[in-house]
Amino acid sequence: MALKSYADCLLAVVVVALTLGVVVVVDATVVTTCRAAADSDRRVDYNFCVAELGKHHDSPDADVWGLAKVAALTGVVDADNAVYDIKGMIAKGSGPRAALARCQQLYGEAGFAFAEAHDDINGRNYAAGKDKAAQAASLARQCDGVFAAVPPLIAQHSSYAAKIAIVCTAITNLIK
């Protein structure tokens, strides 16, 4: 009976841990790099940095240079997700069509800007990479400006673009 109780207890602990998302493995390089980025630039959201970079498949093996590129790539992915979400909003008639179409275009451009940031950082042209990350965030902010009241889903993407651009820039500044 005790063995059954122990097994049941262990199973319950595993289920609770998985349900609560407690089982998260984040590489020490991500943690230390995000800490250094947050320490060097007060605009860096440390928890956001660790969460977003920690879930990318390239992060466990990446050094600071690699994590700067990962930050740019996560910007690309979110910009692409924004385009997809906006297409859905247009299809459902969830907002002014012209404004949504403009945002779709802007997020497409933001995705390309983040991709160019990645390429520039990869080519060790750090100033250009940081400029492209800033440009991507600016394009997302321009999308916000086409609405009288920004739809919450678009506001989430705008916030993400701004945060990841800051992370990308701060980590790029750490490269020696």
Image: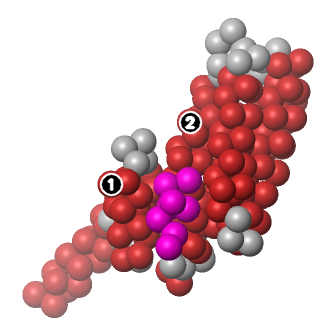
Residue hosting label 2: 159
Position of 96 relative to 53 (above/below): above
How far is mark 2 from mark 1, CA to CA?
21 Å
Q: Which residue is mark 1?
A: 39
Q: Amino acid at mark 1?
A: Asp
Residue 77 drawn in magenta = no
Residue 29: quadrant of the picture: bottom left
Q: Secondary structure at mark 2?
A: helix
Along the line of sight, the residue nearer the viewer: 73 or 130: 130
Q: Is residue 170 magenta?
A: yes
Residue occupying image coordinates x 56% and y 36%: 159
Residue 76 seen from this side: no
Near mark 1 (Cα within 10 A), the count class, few <14, some 14-19 or many ≥20, is few
Q: How many marks?
A: 2
Of circles 2 and 1, the one toward us is 1
Q: Residue at x 35, y 70 (%)?
A: 32
Pick the residue in front: 133 or 60.
133
**Residue for point 57% across, 56% down:** 168
Q: Amino acid at mark 2?
A: Ser
The location of residue 18, given as percent across then percent down, is: 38, 67
* Placement of the N terminus among the 4 image quadrants: bottom left
At which x and y percent is residue 42? 37, 44
The reply, left or right, for residue 1 in relation to residue 76 is: left
Residue most extreme to the bottom:
3
In percent of width and height, residue 117 lies at 72, 57
